[in-house]
Image (cartoon, grey):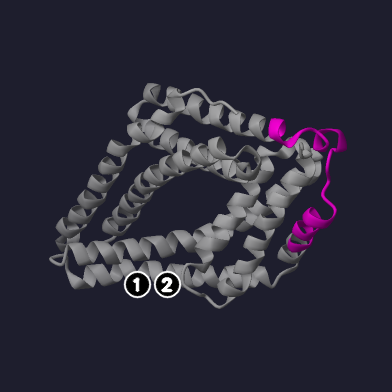
């Protein structure tokens, strides 16, 4: 028996909304990794709405996606500081010869930045704009703005078309990346990572409808997202360390250079894994 696309997409979104709202009390309590989980849930929901936007009236969905982007940006400020603090602490364990005062400066500065950003997030969660976003998310489950002709189509066809479109988009970016010059390559890889993440969420949303092929694509896309995420984290850590170094004492220069070198090595190792992880895009995608 075929399933209509509209109810199938709404069922996926219902789970995604639950996932997002469940993180809210944990973020308020500043539980470990809670900001990250809320950010992931927000981005996932926004991405699924983008991939399956044809099922809905565009204006309503675009407005909701805009608010989700706003929330994800606020969460990202806190999460990025949290990641850098953890990353710098791990670096200092790996390189104990780096001066303690320098290490504490790096870690403490990022922890302070996280604390400040987390405070902003909590204020936002108490505000009217977030309350309206929550209402919009609840309405997405109870009264979704479906385009009824599209929503009545066979779910298998609609989900397959969405996964194929996101897969082709990722493949096009991967094919174009070797043509980028050195100055643009980092951003090209970042765009590939974002496209891989979008494909992953799209395919995960389609697993119950498309079964095996969608699950395999989701796994492969996650690998690309992960390896390029490792690369991006290292690049951003290099930039942060360089900023600290620019305002540091000259006697600390060698220590900063050592940390930058370690992150550069991490970035290179991530890129070494990249070609094997995108190889799945050479195979034809079949329903």
- Asked if residue 126 is positioned above or below residue 279 in the image, the reply reads below
Residue placed under numbered mark 2 in the picture: 112
- The quadrant in which residue 210 appears is top right
- Residue 3 located left or right of residue 241: right
- The quadrant in which residue 205 appears is top right
Across and down, in percent, residue 76 comes to 52, 57
Residue placed under numbered mark 1 in the picture: 108
- Residue 182 located left or right of residue 200: left
Q: Is residue 146 magenta?
A: yes
Q: Secondary structure at mark 2?
A: helix
Direction left: furthest residue:
97
Across and down, in percent, residue 141 comes to 78, 55
- Asked if residue 157 is positioned above or below residue 258 in the image, the reply reads above
Across and down, in percent, residue 189 comes to 41, 36
Q: Is residue 282 magenta?
A: no
Query: Magenta segment, which residues?
Result: 134-158
């Amino acid at each position: 028996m075929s399933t209509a696309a509209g109810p199938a997409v709404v069922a996926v979104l219902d789970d995604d909304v639950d996932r997002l709202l469940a993180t809210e009390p944990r973020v308020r309590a500043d539980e470990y990794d809670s900001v990250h989980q809320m950010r992931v849930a927000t981005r996932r929901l926004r991405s699924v709405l983008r991939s399956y936007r044809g099922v809905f009236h565009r204006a309503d969905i675009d407005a909701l996606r805009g608010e989700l982007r706003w929330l994800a940006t606020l969460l990202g400020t806190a999460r990025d500081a949290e990641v850098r603090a953890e990353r710098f602490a791990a670096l200092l364990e790996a390189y104990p010869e780096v001066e303690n005062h320098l290490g504490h400066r790096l870690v403490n500065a990022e922890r302070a930045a996280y604390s400040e950003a987390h405070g902003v997030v909590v204020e936002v969660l108490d505000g009217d704009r977030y309350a309206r976003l929550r209402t919009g998310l609840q309405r997405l489950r109870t009264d979704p703005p479906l385009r009824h002709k599209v929503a009545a189509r066979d779910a298998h066809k609609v989900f397959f078309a969405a996964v194929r479109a996101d897969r082709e988009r990722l493949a096009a970016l991967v094919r174009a990346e070797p043509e980028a010059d050195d100055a643009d390559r980092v951003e090209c890889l970042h765009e590939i990572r974002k496209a891989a993440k979008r494909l992953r969420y799209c395919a995960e949303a389609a697993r119950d409808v498309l079964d095996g092929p969608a699950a395999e694509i989701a796994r492969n896309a996650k690998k690309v997202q992960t390896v390029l995420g490792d690369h991006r984290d290292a690049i951003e850590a290099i930039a942060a360390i360089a900023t600290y170094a620019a305002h540091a004492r000259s006697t600390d220069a060698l220590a900063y250079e050592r940390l930058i070198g370690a992150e550069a090595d991490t970035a290179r190792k991530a890129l070494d894994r990249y070609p094997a992880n995108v190889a799945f895009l050479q195979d034809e995608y079949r329903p």
